[in-house]
Image (tube, rainbow, N blue to C red):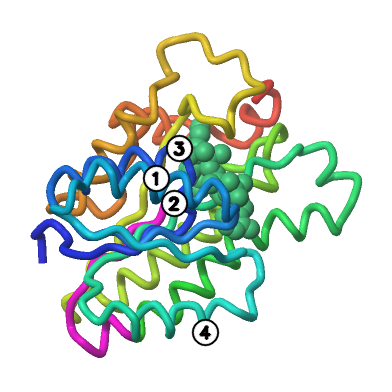
Amino acid sequence: MSAAPRRIVIFGATSRIATEAARLWLARGVHLVLVARNAERLRMLNDDLSLRAGGLAEVDAVAADLAALEGLPTLWKSLSEQFADLDAVLIAHGSLPDQGRCEADPETMLREVRVNALSAMALLTAIANDFEARGSGTIGVIGSVAGDRGRKSNYVYGAAKGMLGLFLQGLRNRLHDKGVRVITFKPGFVITPMTQDFDRQGPLWVRPERVARGIVRAYRGGGEVVYLPWFWRPIMWVIRLTPERVFKRLSL
Ligand SMILES: NC(=O)c1ccc[n+]([C@@H]2O[C@H](COP(=O)([O-])OP(=O)(O)OC[C@H]3O[C@@H](n4cnc5c(N)ncnc54)[C@H](OP(=O)(O)O)[C@@H]3O)[C@@H](O)[C@H]2O)c1
């Protein structure tokens, strides 16, 4: 149950964090199935990784809009038929919304909840049943520390990641004696395209390579709720325990 994967599907493979994880897995000979929305970026990533693989690992690519929920069960079915030896998945896609736009427009808010929570939950429902039936597999999903507590500056994103975190908690509970591992990753502040508009100074900001190393390590064994880097665990412990009357006065 704690071995490295042999063939992994990465949803949202063009994400910077996922790309770094893919490179690390490739160097270990793990076969990759890349799923991403932007066909051109996916093609470039596939070319790059295939070149790096040098014939030692297989790389395949499938383009899909993961916000198109109704197509996701069929997408998983075709992936699991095409690649019978899949033993792991990483769900990495997401988007960091403009909180103000979400407050002004319910449609925008719902779109963000769909991409950050419902999409992964629809995929997980199909994947979990398959892995449970075969009695093995590792499921990893990138959530966020933002899902640990609602903050005025990004509570739509936080609520979506929080919902995803609860879903994963229940799924882990359901599958823990069925041979299937469920890992929730909770990165903090990571320097990727998602955060390009932020002032990314200070000791809490880390490079995606560091987060990717933590992800790859966790698939080989260890934690089930993995804060990345580790220092977010005590930080979020304090943030979760801060009384509401104090918390709402803070400018977070
Ligand atoms: N960066 C951070 O500080 C941070 C912190 C905590 C958690 N996270 C989480 O880490 C994960 C990876 O993010 P990142 O930081 O690596 O950012 P990123 O490089 O901007 O990646 C986001 C990815 O999500 C994909 N995506 C968005 N909507 C999609 C859709 N409908 N269908 C398919 N793919 C879609 C994007 O694809 P396109 O190329 O098609 O746009 C992009 O590849 C996300 O779940 C994010 O919420 C990030």
| Depth check, front residue: 35 or 186 | 35
**Which residue has dot 1 on it?**
18
Which of the image's four quarters has the C terminus?
A: top right
**Which residue has dot 4 on it?**
74
Tell me, yes or no, if residue 109 can be seen here.
yes
**Which residue has dot 2 on it?**
13
Q: Which residues, given as a range, are shown in magenta?
A: 130-146
Q: Are dots 2 and 1 in contact, CB under 8 Å?
A: yes
Q: Are dots 3 and 1 in contact, CB under 8 Å?
A: yes
Pointer 1 or 4: first along the chain: 1
Amino acid of disc 4: Thr
Q: Give the image location of residue 101, x and y in percent.
A: 84, 41
Q: CA distance from mark 3 to mark 4?
A: 26 Å
| Depth check, front residue: 165 or 54 | 54
Tell me, yes or no, if residue 148 can be seen here.
no
Residue visible at 55% across and 77% down in the picture: 72
Amino acid of disc 3: Arg
189 is higher (above) or lower (below) than 40:
above
Q: Are dots 2 and 4 in contact, CB under 8 Å?
A: no
**Which residue has dot 3 on it?**
16
Q: CA distance from mark 3 to mark 1?
A: 5 Å
Q: Secondary structure at mark 2?
A: loop
Tell me: is circle 3 under 8 Å from ligand 1: yes
Q: CA distance from mark 2 to mark 1?
A: 5 Å
